[in-house]
Amino acid sequence: MGLLEIAVSVAAALLVGALARGTWRTILLLILSVLAVYWFQPVIPLRSFDFWLPSLTLAFVILTWLVTSNAGAWRLRQNLYALLLIVGMATVVALSRYFLPKPILTATTPPSFLQYLFLVLILAAFILLLFLFSRRRQSQIITFVIVLLIVVLVILKTPALSQQASIFFRTLANRSADGALATDLRWLGFSYIAFRLIHVLRDRQTGRLPELALSEFATYVVFFPSLAAGPIDRAERFAGDLRREFRLGQDETLSAGRRLVIGLFKKFVIADALALIALNDALAIQVRSTFWMWAVTYAYAFQIYFDFSGYTDIAIGTAQLAGVKLPENFAAPYLKPNLAQFWNSWHITLTQWIRSYFFNPFNRWLRGFRSMPPWTMLLLGQLSTMLLIGLWHGVTINFVLWGLWHGFGLFVQNRWSDFAKRRFNVTDKRKQTALKLGGIFLTFNFVALGWVFFALTGPGLSWMVFRKLFNLL
Amino acid sequence: MDTKPRIRLFGVLLKAALLLMLFNFAFLAIKGVPLGRLSLYNSIFPGRERFPFGESRESYNLSLFDVDAMFASHVLNGTDKAQDEYRVLLIGDSSVWGTLLEPEQTLAGQLNATPISACGKTVRAYNLGYPTISLTKDLMLLDQAKSYDPDLVIWLTTLEAFPKEKQFSSPIIANNAERVRQLIHKYGLAADPHDPELVEPSKWSQTFLSQRRALADLVRLQIYGALWASTGIDQVYPRDYEHAQIDLEASRDFHGLTTLQNNLALDVLDAGMSTAPNMLLVNEPMLVSDGANSDIRYNFFYPRWAYDEYRSMLAQHAQEKNWEYLDLWDLVPAQEFTNSAIHLTPAGETLLADRIATAIQGTCK
């Protein structure tokens, strides 16, 4: 998201917060969010995909709501209106090719109306079919949708599969497959959208999901301030904010403004400046000395933090103007004295999601193996969790290595903590402070070294950087 | 009881607007302060071997119009002249700057690689080339460079830098109107100080808000210092590039001129040659094509008639002025040019450096 998108988002949130009351606030936020799904989607080399991908996002939203809603919920007037509103907005965007001189709502001209109609009918038939099945076999259909979302996510995150998908779509459109790239299918915010949807689907399966109106649910999934870069909120908490009476007052505006200014400064001043000198594939080869290798690695560590936490601040500030209190995603992670605390304060909402929907169930499953020693359980749990977090960023060797790096790191730190607690009892305040500072230093450097895998595209380059960092070349 | 003073939103916004206005116009009041001289180069980062110039992020470099900042980032600015240093400044266009050449492959780099002595001192050459072709641009840099106590200034030039109509077309000149006017006044140049090509800054354009791009460039230049220090890279070196044109158009045109008489900025050349006591003027090597229409043109830049007239005019002018002058126009064979008729390969630069080294040794006064 650039400054223009942020400025428009802030202005829109400000207007909603200041003027809209009650259900109108939800309706306006839904309209704005649906428009944002199209507007934020960057241009991609596949024709009309900057229209189709956002449309598919909305289709997933409707499908997920239908299969998770209570029986008869779709017949309620407010839900029918919300459904009409979402489909109507998508239709307006599709029709905009006929009344706008050049594309404004989408990156390129939307497809012809006939094409739109054809694909909407196919999607509608598919959704309807699953919906009808879900009335009798809800749990199986929910599992099917979860698997579908994971398959799409895996295709998008796996360069080879993503490239194959691009070749497939190019061939389907009678275009040459020569220029197909793995980056062709840049589906804005899908990683976050998929995780929000899976959270809702799983909570429905386990009976923890409260009833949500379609307007609340759709706004939750594609809420425009958190569409591109999170955080990953929880549906019931988000709906609570929408149902709460809200009037944008002076204090809220000032607090949101402060958050926005901090976020903008972090992202567009600090992070963008650091991005110029942060570790990348080219610098991995070009940097000539150990000192400067450390400098560009640290630059990357701070760049990724300021970039991501800046965007989070902007999202939280913008949402606050519209009366939604998004969860925090960062809590001074680089000042944490151990890796476990780091992961409790870095991308908090993702970590919590993984903990709820993977780590805890996986650990419960592991406990079933009674002969397995506890340390093995811990190692397996931490390795697989961190591996999953790595794969969420992309199915590449380097993300796997990054996940394993942190998995092993967490395991070693856990064992060491246990050992140290039993062996040492430091009561002296100065020694405690020194230990804490030492812990911060070690944790930060461990995390910074982990970024070497994250920042680069191949293990060969990462190895080269490690050798330069430790003067082994 | 909550004693925290209540903050009023309107008050905050009003104060912010007032502070912004105040800061914006306060910036206007300090327009004479050469902010460009504030630099991290030559202290935190090593000075650059050549002026900052570049258009892409991959070059770890950027073009800016702030001459002070350009000099402040240059190694010349951070090098105290040693007792035994024979300081040679090289002025010129992209061929001196070294397009497609690493710093040590440029003329300055090659001169420094082989120890040369002049007047009993060790020669240290500094690359002050800048990749646009205009005598006025050279004069502007020369005028600033002379304060660095050179023992010898070598000015490499070519006909393309001479046409009067081309003098202000380079962006670095067009965006330094005040400096150019000072040059016109100081050296009595014939140019119009209010030439429409010179960008005249309005009061508004000198405020902080209008200058944000220039200020950001200044900051970026400092940040790129880290990349210069860590990689030694200051331009993109493509594996492949389009080679200089050998087959030429059958055109006799040279900037629409029929004769060079009264159309070349010789007054600027005279001014430049008067800036330092020890100057050497060099007509730089160029590609002499043997391809199609090479009977009409020497290369992409020059029809034969114009270049021949220029060479004879320059030789005569140098003789009349009693300048040290070297005409090296055909020193380098055609295969030693890269992407332009004046850009040399490392081997081409070696040929040039050998001749210049000999000339330096003979210029001791």
Image (spheres, rainbow, N blue to C red):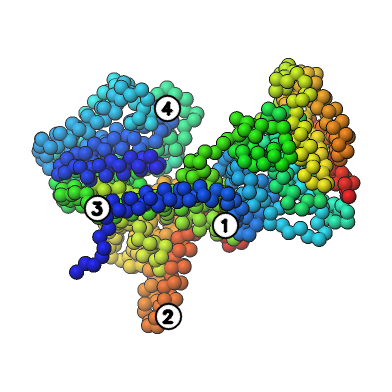
Identify the residue position indicated by label 2 in the image.
Answer: A430
Q: Position of residue A377 (x, y in %)?
A: 33, 63
| Image quarter of residue A9 | top left
What secondary structure is marked by label 4? helix
Q: Is residue B206 visible?
A: yes
Q: Classify 10 Å Cα crowding around label 2: few (below 14), some (14-19), many (20 and above).
A: few
Which of the two labelled residues, at mark 3 and mark 4, occupies the earlier sequence position? 4
- Residue at left 41%, top 33%? A43
Vertical arrangement, residue A234 with respect to residue B282, above or below:
below
Asked if badges 4 and 2 are on one and the same chain, I answer: yes
Q: What chain is tagged by disc 4?
A: A
Identify the residue position indicated by label 4 in the image.
Answer: A170
* Nearer mark to the viewer, of 2 and 3: 3
Q: Classify 10 Å Cα crowding around label 4: few (below 14), some (14-19), many (20 and above).
A: some
Residue closer to the observer: A305 or A319: A319
Q: Amino acid at mark 2?
A: Arg
**C-alpha distance separating marks 1 and 3:** 47 Å
**C-alpha distance separating marks 4 and 2:** 65 Å
Q: Which residue, as the protein is rendered here, is positioned at the far top?
A: B250
Identify the residue position indicated by label 3 in the image.
Answer: A250
Q: Amino acid at mark 1?
A: Met
* Nearer mark to the viewer, of 4 and 2: 2
Instruction: Quadrant for the N terminus of chain B, please.
Output: bottom left
* Nearer mark to the viewer, of 1 and 4: 1
Q: Amino acid at mark 4?
A: Arg
Q: Position of residue B166 (x, y in %)?
A: 68, 29
